[in-house]
Amino acid sequence: MASDLSSTPPPPPARSPAPRAPLTIAPMRLADLSAVMELEVRCFNSPWSLDVYRRELTRNPRAFYRVVRPADPPARPDLPPLLAYGGCWITGDECHVMTIATHPEWRRRLLGEWLLLDLLAEARLRAAAVCTLEVRAGNTAAIRLYEKLGFQEVGRRPSYYPTTAHAPREDALIMTLFELNTGAVWRPLIQRRREVETAIDRGFSGSS
């Protein structure tokens, strides 16, 4: 007996593919170093050299570095090749944030916070229990961000940052995030990371 095709339910409509996030965080590559150096001299009064970054990427097994870049660069000619970058060292169960920077023209867009949260996630995967960094005593915006994420001031390095043509000698505050390996500390950071990613996706999707 022939089947009654009229009773066969229609196939469900095809789902539209999820929109691609406008930005992505990825490991820093040697090919990124030209763009990194362009930002380095714009972001820091005492920039690292190209050789320092090359050694960090090729000869330092304790180090990991990340960059924020457009997910589809040809589709976003309005964006620079790199919008932020940063890196850490892992020694035992301690993570030290060595550097973190955001493109001067794209600050106050949550990129630095997003990148720092990604670095903390990688540090946690590498069994870090604490994370420490230095920050200029006068960099109130950065200090507020670190405090928001749970970092505490634990010390001061007098005259840590040398005098340059653009800035006077300045102390560094030592700030530490404790118990990164515990759920009580990590769960709020996961939630904040989701919030930041949502805000960035929404903000940069409309930036073209």
Image: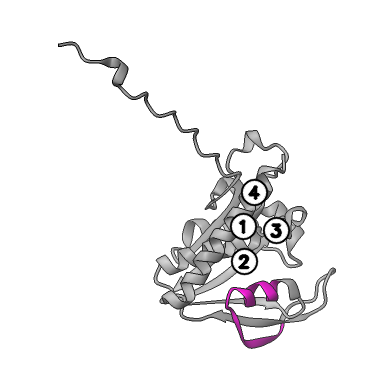
> Viewer-proximal residue, 148 or 76?
148
Q: What stretch is highlighted in magenta?
A: 142-159
Q: Do the residues labelled 2 and 1 touch (CB within 8 Å)?
A: yes
Check residue 202 in the rendering and tell me which mark sits there, or answer none: 4
Label 2 sits on residue: 99
What's the residue at 77%, 78% (across, down)? Answer: 138
Taking the image as shown, residue 128 lies to the left or right of residue 132, namely left
Residue kind at label 3, given as amino acid type = Glu
Q: Which one is nearer the viewer's eye here, 194 or 137?
A: 194
Task: Name the front one of labels 4 and 2.
Answer: 4
Q: How many labels does the image show?
A: 4
Disc sitting over residue 85 in the figure:
1
Q: Label 3, on which residue?
A: 40
Q: Which of marks 3 and 1 is nearer the N terminus?
A: 3
Q: Determine which quarter of the picture holds residue 142.
A: bottom right
For the residues labelled 4 and 2, the Cα–Cα distance comes to 27 Å
Dot 4: element: helix
Q: Count neighbours of disc 2 (C-alpha within 10 A) and say few if under 14, some if 14 to 19, many if 20 or more.
A: some
Earlier residue among tags 2 and 1: 1
The answer to whether 149 appears left or right of 5 in the picture is right
Residue type beneath disc 1: Tyr
Q: Earlier in the sequence, mark 4 or mark 3?
A: 3
Q: Using the numbered discs, state the Cα–Cα distance from disc 4 to disc 3 in whole angstroms.
A: 28 Å
In three-dimensional space, the C-alpha distance between marks 2 and 1, rounded to whole angstroms, equals 8 Å
Q: How far apart are marks 1 and 4 (CA)?
A: 21 Å
Closer to the observer: label 4 or label 3?
A: 4
- x%, y% of residue 11? 37, 25
Which type of secondary structure does the marked residue at label 3 adopt? Answer: helix
Instruction: Name the residue located 69 percent from the left edge and 76 percent from the top edge.
Output: 143
Return the disc, 4 or 2, that comes first in the chain's sequence: 2
Q: Can residue 189 be seen in this view?
A: yes
Sequence-wise, the earlier of marks 1 and 4 is: 1
